[in-house]
Image: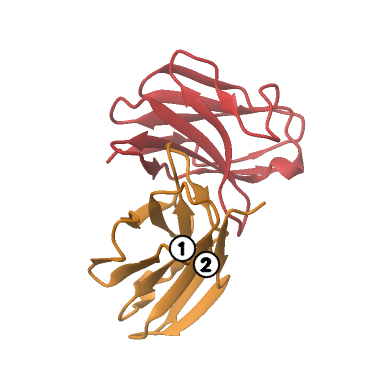
Chain colours: A red, B orange
Amino acid sequence: SAVISQKPSRDICQRGTSLTIQCQVDSQVTMMFWYRQQPGQSLTLIATANQGSEATYESGFVIDKFPISRPNLTFSTLTVSNMSPEDSSIYLCSVGVGDGEQFFGPGTRLTVL
Amino acid sequence: QQQVKQSPQSLIVQKGGISIINCAYENTAFDYFPWYQQFPGKGPALLIAIRPDVSEKKEGRFTISFNKSAKQFSLHIMDSQPGDSATYFCAARGGSYIPTFGRGTSLIVHP
């Protein structure tokens, strides 16, 4: 398993600003993922963040809006840029370990006014 | 196109009853089927998972039933408790770490 922490746990931001979310894992992992979960909805994959390479974005998500860093095997950041109310959501970091099991962080609840 | 269909969207059960959540998939390449439990304000947590070489897996009060020919799998929660009240997501994965999630089922267990 893996223990994942995220900062901040929640934030309220003004439209047009940016927020960087941090994800820290207690062990080295190759694959890290960022998800978005809108209220009462399922999980939508934003991107896969692999150390030493550019993040791979899913359809509908672009690097200019959601830049991701992955400086080492235990840490990643997701930035939500030029925010609008439509970006209000829970952002989840997850990691893949072992034979492919995914473990999730506690999430960052973002509200954009 | 939703590749994993989950039902029901919401479920209300009395304490001690059986909760049943169903999922169906389309992609025959899927070979790993996890269930996640999510409490409000928390991230999803892996609850139980199954691979298609078995038809059933049980862990405590939680059982996954798997029907490969029908491409369906279900979660049964026996003796449901108020503490089981949460959102449950089924998922399916094949060949990578990235699962496809169902839409989720909000379970409420009344005392």
Query: Which residue does the image show at 58% across and 53% down from the upper left?
Result: B3
Residue A93: x and y in percent read: 47, 37
Tag shown at residue B96? none
Chain that bears disc 2: B
Q: What residue is shown with label 1?
A: B88
The residue sitting at the front extreme is B69
Quadrant where the C terminus of chain B sits is: bottom left
* Element assignment for label 2: strand
- Of A111 and B78, nearer the camera is B78
Q: Amino acid at mark 2?
A: Thr
Residue A113 visible, this orientation: no
Residue B93 visible, this orientation: yes
Q: What residue is shown with label 2?
A: B105
Query: Which residue does the image show at 38% across and 42% down from the upper left?
Result: A102
Asked where in the image residue B61 lies, by quadrant, the reply is: bottom left
Q: CA distance from mark 2 to mark 1?
A: 5 Å
* Element assignment for label 1: strand
Report whether B47 appears left or right of A9: left
Q: Amino acid at mark 1?
A: Tyr
Q: Is residue A5 above or below residue B105?
A: above
Q: Is residue B95 above or below residue A79?
A: below
Q: Are marks 2 and 1 in contact (CB under 8 Å)?
A: yes
Q: Is residue A10 above or below residue A56?
A: below
- Of B50 and A105, nearer the camera is B50
